Image (tube, rainbow, N blue to C red):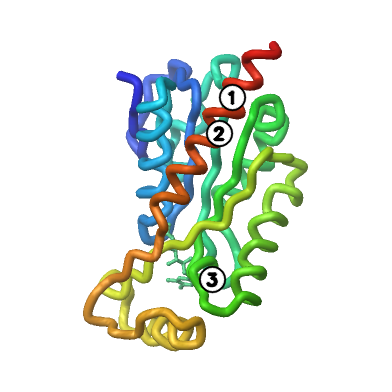
């Protein structure tokens, strides 16, 4: 199997071998969907790729000697990325710096009609790896999802207000997919190219 998903299941203590792990942290599930898509496109390009949830134990079991490239994704909530992603990147900055790597930040601001909001999301994305001494070759700010149906009453109200400010949909009777999947596919292709280029000079 060249494309695998690893969630919160217990492992058998054996190292997990994966050429291009796509690590992710998520609160409402969109970063997981994006990680799955990245792993799937990388698989179609001929790599062993797996999406690995940073909330589960698998991320600690990776055999880094087998990793040829890595991606890490997290989403923005109240201006911050998940602590699980921060902790992971701090712990594995040296491992990540050894291979072509990318960070993708998922947010509502990335889809904003206000260029200042888009720039703010870009800046938060760029600052995330720097804070841990990780220097990815690519940092991408990716539009996420307005998941009104998944929010509780209060969060739905808050998100509706934020959406209005950012020119996003405000009908809370349904969810809105704001992710541009062609941008996600392009990120996967770009990483594949960088990994092949690194292998060519090694
Ligand atoms: C409580 C809450 C706070 C959020 N805060 C921000 C924020 O500060 N900036 C932003 O751009 N998006 C914000 N968002 C939007 C999320 O980043 C967006 O919905 C993203 O798709 C969530 O990804 P996930 O499902 O992987 O967690 C927030 C969403 C929620 C529910």
Q: Which mark is residue 27?
A: none
Nearer the N terminus, badge 3 or badge 1?
Answer: 3
Nearest to the eye among marks 3 and 2: give it. Answer: 2
| Residue indicated by mark 1 | 195
Above or below 4: residue 186: below
Q: Which residue is drawn at 31% across and 75% down?
A: 148
Q: Is residue 143 left or right of residue 7?
A: right
**Pointer 1 local density, CA inside 10 Å: few below 14, some 14–19, many at least 20:** some
Q: Residue at x 55, y 55 (%)?
A: 105
Q: In this view, does 177 lie to the left or right of 17?
A: left
The N terminus: image quadrant: top left
Q: Residue 109 carries which label?
A: 3
Q: Which mark is residue 191?
A: 2
**Pointer 3 local density, CA inside 10 Å: few below 14, some 14–19, many at least 20:** many
Regarding mark 3 in the picture, which secondary structure is present there? helix
Q: Is residue 92 left or right of residue 157?
A: right
Q: Does the residue labelled 3 lie within 8 Å of ligand 1?
A: yes
Above or below 188: residue 15: above
Q: Are marks 3 and 1 in contact (CB under 8 Å)?
A: no
Nearer the N terminus, badge 3 or badge 2?
Answer: 3
Q: How far apart are marks 3 and 1 (CA)?
A: 30 Å
Q: Do the residues labelled 1 and 2 touch (CB within 8 Å)?
A: yes
Residue located farthest toward the left when viewing the structure as drawn: 173
**Pointer 2 local density, CA inside 10 Å: few below 14, some 14–19, many at least 20:** many
Q: Residue at x 50, y 64 (%)?
A: 107
């Amino acid at each position: 199997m060249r494309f695998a998903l690893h969630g919160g299941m217990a492992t058998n203590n054996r190292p997990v071998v994966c050429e291009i792990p796509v690590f992710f942290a998520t609160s409402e599930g969109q970063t997981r969907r994006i990680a799955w898509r990245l792993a799937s496109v990388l698989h179609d390009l001929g790599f062993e790729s797996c999406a690995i949830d940073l909330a589960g134990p698998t991320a600690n079991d990776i055999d880094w000697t087998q990793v040829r490239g890595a991606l890490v994704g997290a989403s923005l909530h109240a201006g911050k990325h998940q602590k699980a992603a921060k902790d992971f990147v701090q712990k594995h900055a040296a491992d990540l710096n050894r291979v072509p790597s990318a960070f993708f930040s998922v947010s509502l601001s990335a889809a904003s009609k206000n260029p200042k909001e888009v720039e703010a999301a870009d800046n938060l994305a760029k600052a995330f790896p720097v804070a841990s001494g990780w220097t990815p070759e690519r940092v991408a700010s990716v539009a996420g999802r307005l998941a009104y149906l998944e929010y509780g009453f209060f969060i739905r109200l808050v998100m509706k207000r934020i959406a209005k400010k950012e020119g996003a949909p405000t009908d809370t009777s349904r969810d809105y997919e704001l992710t541009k999947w062609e941008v996600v596919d392009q990120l996967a292709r770009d990483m594949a190219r960088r990994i092949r280029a690194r292998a060519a000079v090694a």
